[in-house]
Image (cartoon, helix red, strand yellow):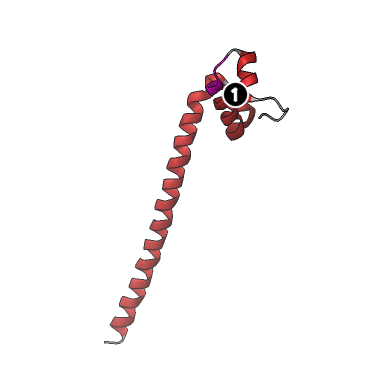
Amino acid sequence: MLENGRKRKEMALEKDVSLNSVNIWIRNYQLYGRDGLSFNKRTDYVAQEETQKELKQLKKIGKRYNEQLEEIEILKKFQAFLKENE
C-alpha cells in the first residue's frame, strides 16, 4: 500500500502501466528519492550501484593494506630487537 492509502494495483491501473513498473518506481523512490523517478537517469543508478560495490571493495582492500603496513612495522621492530640482542 502507498503512503496515501492507495494500493499499488490501483496506481498501475490509473497510470496504465504494469504492476511491476509501479513496484520499480517505488523501489527507486525509496532508494534515491525523487531523482529515482527520472526515467532518463535509470542507467546512472545502475552505475551508481556498481560504484557503491566498488567503493566497498576498495575500503576492504584499503583496510587490509593498512593492516599489512602495521604488520611490516611490527616485523621491522622485532627484527631490530633481535639484532640488538644477538
Q: Position of residue 4 (x, y in %)?
A: 73, 27
Q: Considering the image in quadrants, where does the C terminus appear? A: bottom left
Q: Position of residue 8 (x, y in %)?
A: 62, 24
Q: Residue furthest bottom?
A: 85
Segment colored magenta: 17-21
- Look at 38% across and 62% down and name the residue there: 69
Q: Residue furthest left?
A: 86
The amino acid marked with disc number 1 is Leu
- Look at 37% across and 67% down and name the residue there: 71
> Which image quadrant for residue 75?
bottom left
Q: Nearer the viewer, residue 19 or 57?
A: 19
> Which image quadrant for residue 32?
top right
Name the residue that disc number 1 marks.
37
| In magenta segment, residue 57 | no
- Look at 46% across and 43% down and name the residue there: 55
Q: Residue furthest top?
A: 16
Q: Position of residue 16 (x, y in %)?
A: 59, 12
The vertical placement of 24 against 12, above or below, is below
* Left or right: 40, with 1 as reference point: left
| In magenta segment, residue 19 | yes
Judged from the image, the secondary structure of the residue bearing numbered disc 1 is helix
Q: Nearer the viewer, residue 32 or 23?
A: 23
Q: Nearer the viewer, residue 59 or 36?
A: 36
